Amino acid sequence: MRTNRTVLAGVAAALLLAGCASTQGIAPQAQLREPAVPQAAAQPVAPVSSTWWRDFGDPQLDALVEQALRDSPTLGVAKARLRRAQSTTDVARTADQPQFQGQFDFTRERFSENGLLPPPLGGSTRDSVTAQVNMNWELDFFGRNQAALRAALGTERAAQADVAAARVVLASNVARSYFQLVRANEQIAVAERTLAQREEQLKLVRQRVSAGLDTNLELRQSEGALPEARQQLEALREQAQVTRNALAALVGAGELPAPAKLPTMAALRPITTVPALPADLLGRRPDVAAARARVEAATQNVKEAQAEFYPSVNLVAFAGLTSLGLNNLIDLGSRQLGVGPAVRLPIFAEDRLRAGLRGRTADLDAAIESYNGAVVEAIHEAADAVASLQSLARQLAEQRQALAAAEGAYDIALQRYRAGLGTFLNVLSAETSVLAQRRLGVDLAARVLDARVALCRALGGGVTEQTALAAH
């Protein structure tokens, strides 16, 4: 007996050693990098409101953003992925719990007369019945199930952050399209004023030609300015319609504001400019939080693959009844019980296990580099938005002075023409400068609004890492 035990122990030790393949030489190559945010403020910057679009003071914009957040298919896809990740987590949570399965088998069988069973059972037809409960409990000695659960939780957190990031992107795209529509509408107003002004100038030139004060040269110059103004007006109307189509695609079903009901640039309330980038910028970005959660999930996937190199131990048990003949099933003698361990060793599977671990490690490297890219992009976007706002403030100040000078020059040129001291070409040249400055003023105001939206998006859209991972 002692000899048998020694032999069994030796065989078990040999199997255990054969089953534990080596993970040597397989390790991640990428490293997490978190560069410092440039120009970080000495004092913490107040976070962006989670409903930052309301700060512009336009109820129509508020309604459009809320409609998009409610009806957007893109956001619906992100929410569906979150539900899928949550279901995977729920499945992973059950891996460490005992698994019970009910069993009922009923077989009517004729036993062979020449088989193992002697007559009268041999040659007879009987009912074979089994009713029992089976239990299987995997004892997670090497942490494989726990690693799988933590990986599923990381994937779920990434999906939660993806939903928050999709909300930020959708709201910012709606706001930017809306402001582009406001810009096009205001440019149309400038073009319409230009066309009306040139029609008035044509009347004046015709009167002067009739009075012999001007020649056909001035008349042709004035007439040629009208088709140019109409063409510019039509091009702006095309831009406005294309922008309306884009906005309609973002918000889904519903009526968009009529052009007459759109606000002017001056009516939109400005958002306070952030003077510098916040030091905790990366903690405010849901896309960065999602990338970090994927790194955590990939890390746990590597640990799960490493745990597969070791034996798995299950505790197996069953209890039930089995009998020949349904009438004997509930007899006390029909009961059967069993319990015992089941050990599974990955014998001679080293190549397969190492290949699987290399794949998981490569996935971790990809997740780390994706996170590093998200960090660089976050800093880049925020820095660009701050730089644009600071530059646009200076450009607007210069543009207002240039517009005032151009309008003054135009008034002088028009007065000199009416007095017969200048040519109509001087009037058209001065008017061209005025119109160019008016259009530039509208474009700069629109760029300011766009840059403010870009800054809100770059700062995470009012979503912190904690709220992103808690969102559903």
Image: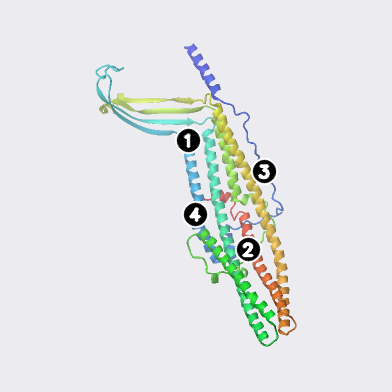
Q: Residues within 10 Å of mark 2 (few under 14, many from 20)?
A: many
Callout 3 amino acid: Arg
In space, the residues marked 4 and 1 are separated at their CA atoms by 34 Å
Q: Are marks 4 and 1 in contact (CB under 8 Å)?
A: no
Q: Secondary structure at mark 3?
A: loop
Image: 279 above or below 367: below
The residue positioned farthest toward the bottom in the image shown: 211
Between 365 and 207, the one lying in front of the other is 207
Circle 3: is it few (<14), some (14-19), or many (20+) Cα within 10 Å? few
**In what element is the residue under mark 1?**
helix
Say if residue 280 shows up in the picture: no
Dot 1: within a 10 Å radius of its alpha carbon, few (fewer than 14), some, or many (20 or more) residues? some
Location of mark 1 (residue): 95
- Distance from Cα at disc 3 to Cα at disc 1: 34 Å
Q: Amino acid at mark 4?
A: Pro
Residue 93 vs 180, above or below: the answer is above
Q: Label 2 vs label 3: CA separation? A: 33 Å
Of the residues shown, which amino acid type is indicated by label 1?
Ala
**Which is nearer the eye, 439 or 373?**
439
Q: Quarter-wise, where is residue 56 in the image?
A: bottom right
Residue in the foreground of this view, choosing between 129 and 433: 433
Q: Return the residue at label 3.
A: 33
Q: Position of residue 330 (x, y in %)?
A: 29, 28
Which amino acid type corresponds to the residue marked 2 in the rendered image?
Answer: Leu
Nearer-N-terminus badge (2/3): 3
Q: Classify residue 430 as left or right of residue 164.
A: right
In the picture provided, is 434 more to the left or to the right than 178?
right
- Residue located beneath label 2 in the image: 449
Q: Secondary structure at mark 2?
A: helix
Q: Which residue is mark 4?
A: 73
